[in-house]
Image (cartoon, helix red, strand yellow):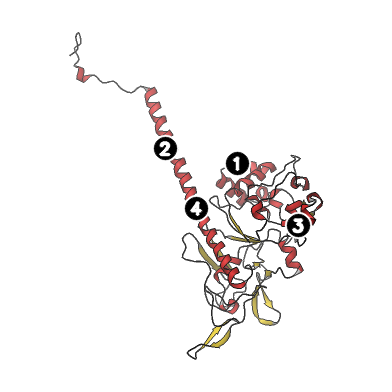
Amino acid sequence: MCAGCSIPRTCRRRGFTLVELLATIGVIFLIMGLAIVAYSSATRSAQSAADRAAVNGVKLAVEQFQSEFGFLPPLVRDMGVESVTDEPVFPFQRLPSDPIRYVPLVVSPGTDEGVADLRGQDEDTPERYSDYSIAFYLVGALAAEIDGVDGPGFVEVRDDGTFAPTQLYVDAQGNEVEGSARGPDRYASFYDLSRGGVELFVESPSETSLPVGVRAELRDRAGLPIRYYRWLPDGVPFATAVASDPDAYTDDDFGYAAWGAGSSISLSGPLAYYNVPALVLDAFGSPIEDRDGNGTIEAADYADGAYTFPVDLRQARYAVVAAGPNQLFGDEDPDLLSTDDTLRRRYAQRLQLSESRLASDADYRLEALALAREDNVVEVGS
């Protein structure tokens, strides 16, 4: 016992004060918050790495295709198609010379119309990307009636997007085998379908009829299609027509709606010459924005003095793009964020934004689209 105290020392107890309890709880919540942030960051990093691996795999498949056939995979005209039941039947057409056969409908750089499409001069195909090209030409997901092979794989591809008719050949053992015009060989999928996090999605309106309305996509871990972009530079000498006087060289492009430009805009300098789609361009650290602050995107915002064209894109002719961890491409028309409730809710949830502001604030919608594009995984090649 203490001197003058009748209570044994061992019986005395000192409880926590309210301040101490609150401080302890605060420390616990702080640690939990840091752990959640660290976990979220690690998860996003892992997702981004998975998306990057998938996109790189597709790029390698594009290079293998180009090495084998001597041209890039065709760009299938699938822009804006929402359902396999859309009319007219899409993205296939009957081959005029052989009405029994159906062939993919593609943008061919060998025609005036195809050149205009790839340069962004056609308002019906402003974005210059395809969800279907990878599955059609790198995987061979079409029926044998179209690509010559039932299941993954295909016969020889021609630069107009058609598949060479299968023919009968006699092998070394004297057996008749089917093959393309090059010979008896069939091409296996150029993309390894066993890679984790990527799936081949194929949808046909009927299991018994020829799948002329087939929808085939290579999808990422979130179920979104991996896009294939193509474009062409203008066919004039750069040194004399552009570099000598950039401001004097102009061209119209329909692919900038998501950046607030409306339908068509007149561009100048290297931006007008190279015709790189806006979403691909935005991934190279040169965001397209209202540089003069007058509330609209216009030619002055792209003047040579205000816009430096990325060197890495000067030789590029195609890109492979995935939406990234936030699962948003960020290239929708900004007006849709005010009128489409489902799309607006998706943006609000994925980006932690105010749904009401997305509905009412035009500048806020442009900021949301720019934020969505920051996650895109983009790889370019020539």
- The residue indicated by pointer 2 is 32
Q: CA distance from mark 2 to mark 3?
A: 57 Å
At which x and y percent is residue 43?
Answer: 46, 48
Report the disc number at residue 238.
3
| Badge 1 amino acid | Ser
Q: Is 212 above or below relative to 59?
A: below
Report the disc number at residue 49.
4
Q: Is 35 above or below relative to 105?
A: above
Report the disc number at residue 354.
1
- Secondary structure at numbered mark 1: loop
Asked which quadrant contains residue 154, the reply is bottom right
Q: CA distance from mark 2 to mark 1?
A: 25 Å
Q: Are marks 2 and 3 in contact (CB under 8 Å)?
A: no
- Secondary structure at numbered mark 4: helix
- Secondary structure at numbered mark 3: helix
Q: Which tag, 4 or 3, sits closer to the chain's start? A: 4
